[in-house]
Image: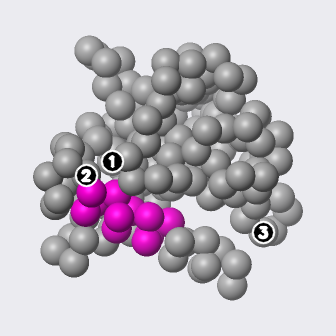
Amino acid sequence: MRRAFRCRRIAALVCVVGCVGVACGVGSPPPPISQASLVAHWANDEGVRIAFASDHTLRAVGLDHAPGAEAGSCPAATKGRWDFFGPVNDSGSSSSDESLTRGGMIAVHGKDGKDDTCTFIAVTRKDGQAFGLCLAQDPEPVCTDDETLRRSRPVRSR
């Protein structure tokens, strides 16, 4: 039940992101990243580290002070799941789906045991040829260079 509530909350956020970022003409959609490129260790200068695995699991450290995580909801170290959001549809909403293999927004569900403990979106950014991830809770995420997660190394297959 709690996961369904969190999924609806993320879907509502993506609806707002889609409207503000595309339909309302404020900006362009985030550049899509492939699953092969996302599956790696990502880190920033603030101490946040996330390892995205190809089986849609993740391990993270430092989410308790991540700029985009819901205040106070994330433990310092967590395991969880991730998936890409699909394109925004005509009604202005989008949903996350593990079958998608690329996207510009990634749903992250941190877990503590069986319950979601923190939920947020990683929005892709691109500087030249390099991708970055900005953790977001609002429609127009603004990440400083210190807050932007950068790919550090691939994740080995399990």
Q: Is residue 41 left or right of residue 32?
A: right
Which label sits on residue 21?
A: 2
Q: Is residue 15 magenta?
A: yes
Which label sits on residue 115?
A: 3
Q: Which residue is rendered at x = 33% and y = 45% of the image?
A: 104
| Real-space Cα separation, disc 3 to disc 2, in angstroms | 31 Å
Residue 90 placed where, x, y %? 16, 74
Residue 63 placed where, x, y %? 72, 40
Rendered-image quadrant of the N terminus: bottom right
The mark that comes first in sequence, 3 or 1, is 1
Q: Is residue 144 left or right of residue 119?
A: left
Q: Which residue is rendered at x = 39% and y = 53% of the image?
A: 139
Above or below, 74 against 116 in this view is above
| Real-space Cα separation, disc 2 to disc 1, in angstroms | 15 Å
Q: Secondary structure at mark 3?
A: strand
Residue 113 placed where, x, y %? 85, 62
Asked whether the viewer can see residue 55, the reply is: no
Q: Nearer the viewer, residue 118 or 38?
A: 118
Which label sits on residue 145?
A: none
Q: Which residue is rendered at x = 27% and y = 57% of the image?
A: 20
The mark that comes first in sequence, 2 or 1, is 2
**Which span of residues is magenta-colored?**
10-20
Q: Which residue is rendered at x = 31% and y = 71% of the image?
A: 93
Q: Amino acid at mark 2?
A: Gly
Q: Amino acid at mark 1?
A: Gly
Which label sits on residue 103?
A: 1
Q: Secondary structure at mark 1?
A: strand
Q: Is residue 80 magenta?
A: no
Rendered-image quadrant of the C terminus: top right
